[in-house]
Image (cartoon, grey):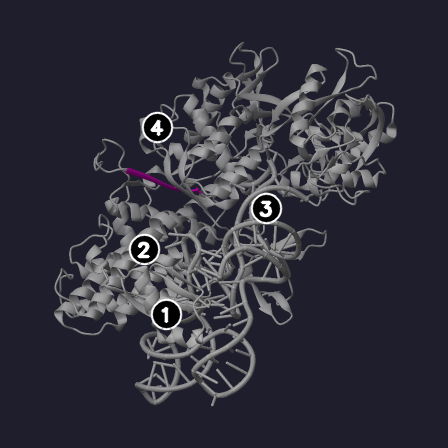
Amino acid sequence: MDAQYRPEIIEPEAQQHWEEKQAYRAPDPNEPGWDSTKPKYYCLSMFPYPSGKLHMGHVRNYTIGDVLARYHRMKGYNVLQPMGWDAFGLPAENAAIANNVAPAGWTYANIDYMRGQLKRLGFAIDWRRELATCKPDYYRWEQWFFTKLYEKGLIYKKMAAVNWDPVDCTVLANEQVIDGRGWRSGALVEKRDIPMYFFRITAYAEELLSGLDNLPGWPERVKTMQRNWIGKSFGVEIHFPLNERHEDGQDVLKVFTTRADTLFGVTYVAVAAEHPLATQAAANSPELAAFIDECKQGSVAEADMATMEKKGMDTGLKVYHPFTNEPIPVFVANYVLMGYGEGAVMAVPAHDERDFAFAEKYALPIRPVIKPTDGELELPLKAAYVDLGRLFDSGDFSGRTSDDAIEKIALVLKNLKLGEKRTTWRLRDWGISRQRYWGCPIPIIHCPTCGDVPVPEDQLPVVLPEVVKIDIGSPIKKMPSFYECACPKCGGPAERETDTMDTFVESSWYYARYACPDLGAGMLDERANYWLPVDQYIGGIEHAILHLLYARFFHKLMRDEGLVSTNEPFTNLLTQGMVIAETYYRELGDGRKLWLNPADVEQAASGPILKSDGQPVMAGGVEKMSKSKNNGVDPQALIDQYGADTARLFMMFAAPPEQSLEWSDAGVEGAHRFLRRLWKTVHEHVERGDVSAYSGAELDSTLQDFRRQLHQTIAKVTDDIERRKQFNTAIAANMELMNALARLDGTDVLTRSVRQEALENIVLMLAPIVPHICRILLKALRPGACLVGAAWPTVDACALVRNEIELVLQVNCKLRGQLLVATDATRETIEKAALESPEAQKHMEGKPAKKVVVVPGRLVNIVV
RNA sequence: GCCCGGGUGGCGGAAUCGGUAGACGCAGUGGACUCAAAAUCCACCGCUAGCAAUAGCGUGCCGGUUCGAGUCCGGCCCCGGGCACCA
């Protein structure tokens, strides 16, 4: 064994060895190497978008996955850890325009570079399963599945709003709309309705909601976010007649409310700008038409809708209160969403904050009808009273509680045929059409006679041309060779759909395809049912809702198509916190921002400056590492300087996985120092000659204490990795053990055998985190041993036994000393010993004890 | 704006079920080794007062429950993630 720790030599050597031996190949059932007695463990990290280089978030994500994969391998599982590329997406098009290259070439070059980086980090990946979603052998099955769903009616077409840039004449992603303007053109963005395909995710809303209750391995916060997102709410649909006389079959304005108890407090109703009533009223009011146009400005993003100034305009139309027949004005309001509920809301300013603000702004009446169950309202209201309570000024319903009134009002409305109880969902159907080039083509042919016809299976895949010239707008929309085709039904001339699919579609089923990436005859085969569900899924918390909900949805779609047999795709979920970093930018002349990488910026006395020109830059706040804000930190420099093990160790030691982490490389030295110390310790030990690990001779108290710490550490580290998934404390425990080992001097055989036992176990415990160095150290300690196939350490229960324990002694909750008692001491003995101890006597100052609290194994607190 | 998290020394963090706040590491200070430096090793290291023993304060802020709160409850402030076309 070399006296020096040289990661630059041992790491590539280990990686080459693993690759040659296919050490991390995960055998499928009945393949060579498959062992039917081993339980399977499918460990999956979210695949990366090939943006160019890895960033620290990737290192964090994949190291967590690798630690869990390697740990379970040591525990005797048949472990699958695959890797692939979420290869379609917007950044490829942007890069293509900026550098005048084709998105495909750019993407493949990035994949090659990033694959090299992943291999350099030494992850135990089965690389033969690698897939890229932009390859036809992957997306052809997505297209095939699309046609199946289309035939089942689970996909349909409707009009929906997009961000329209009127200067570039192109659709913009929400990310490309900044302060209501197109990022390239700077033009004011408009909402425009275009036809789009939708996945009927709402048909699965109930199951997506209830299924969360059967996912104990998911973080509660993710389940809460998904529940809120799905947003099942029970309420009442109320019909406001458009005519004064209530007659059957008359026109009504439908609204949905969860607060039917406030019905007598309605002082106006508000409809969305796209609502038919608004259109009708605008026909003879140019002023209103102008206002409706104004509402159509701005982006379609909900965050923009919710933060913009609430505006409205009276349509002049009236509806009539279903109970009192009172006329109620109809407003058009920019905050009412056409896509949610009925595109109309009843407004109760007294009991809704938004309505209250709106009513104050437009001097509309505020009519309180709910008061606290055990008190009175302070009138006039200074703010909306939004809690449930008791009704007043509400006709026959006055005096009832809110809950009671909601039931009763729904019943009476139903009898009047003016409404009924209803369940609504916040979840909307999933629009998947994108007017972009670099995505999976939607397999539909538009025929003037037959309408929309799905592409037959034998004509799949619809291949996306990879060699294109790209500027603003999708090249396939200008490419007759792509879109001109014959109708599969009637054979007449027809046109192919030129929209592509949302990239979330590819990432909704890739986890299943890893089981059988080579399958040419179908989407999935029996191997998927062996490996699925994923036992451990690891990825960023930013995917808590969309990606994870879509993947759950897709799994159910695949189940109902008979492709998989389980209900949920991911049994256990670990949501890693974001790696965040400061963002820096400079304003360009036209108001746009040029984002600068933190690596190119340094802190001067005057503030941040660009290293290259020494001129100041603006700090834009701390955000998740991303391509668009250019604040990703490339791990390559770290790997080059210290090696993969140090990068992995430091990343795992920096913070627990679920916590967000502001990037700083302060402390990398310490991680590296620890590995050098570990190397040196093993080297010195083995240089003294072979010794076998301790096996049961009589020990003095020092060695006994040390062995107890060793086996406590094994227990703790096992629990930290397996249950707590907290690696920083697992590393810290090993560091403490190393510190204790360093204090253990003595070169007799017994001490050396205990040291051998400790070092073997430390090396095995650290192996999932720093596999390269541990591979060499294990070989040095146990000549002939191999890390691949090594077993996880076990706890020697005998080493943990102790006769006495130390309790904390408190007087009035203040720490006053320690108390050594027998492990099996009774409460009475402990109390007596505590009261008699000199520390207690001193601080009790002769006063009698009011109470003595004994917490077994922990402390005694004497209250005086 | 709405939904979900987080806030502990100079810094990253620990305290797992309400029981010793600050493990482990970084930075810093002092020392050993060295011609010197690097590396390594040893010691100290929350704040205030004190020579010290020790005392008081201390987990974003305000209040509450409890013998006991970083941990539980109520209210606020700040930071991060998501908001359906970034992935």
- Residue range corresponding to the magenta coloring: A40-47
Find disc 3 in the rendering and name its residue: A98
Callout 3 amino acid:
Ala
Give me the residue at 60% from left, 25% from top: A423
Task: Return the disc, 4 or 1, that comes first in the chain's sequence.
Answer: 4
- Mark 1 or 3, nearer chain start: 3
Q: Relative to A607, is A86 on the left or the right?
A: left
Label 1 sits on residue: A835
Q: A61 or A723, which is in the foreground?
A: A723
**N-term mark: 1 or 2:** 2
Q: In the image, what residue occupies the spot 42% across and 21% down? A: A561
Q: Nearer the viewer, mark 3 or mark 4?
A: 4
Q: Position of residue A458 (x, y in %)?
A: 43, 18
The reply to whether label 4 and label 1 mark residues of one chain is yes
Task: Name the main secondary structure of what is drawn in magenta.
Answer: strand
Count neighbours of disc 1 (C-alpha within 10 A) and say few if under 14, some if 14 to 19, many if 20 or more.
Answer: many
The answer to which quarter of the image holds residue A359 is top right
Residue A717: mark: 2
Along the line of sight, the residue nearer the viewer: A13 or B28: B28
Chain-order first, disc 2 or disc 3: 3
Dot 1: element: helix
Q: Residues within 10 Å of mark 4 (few under 14, many from 20)?
A: few
Left or right of A698? Residue A333 is right
Mark 2 burial class by Cα count in 10 Å: few <14, some 14-19, many 20+: many
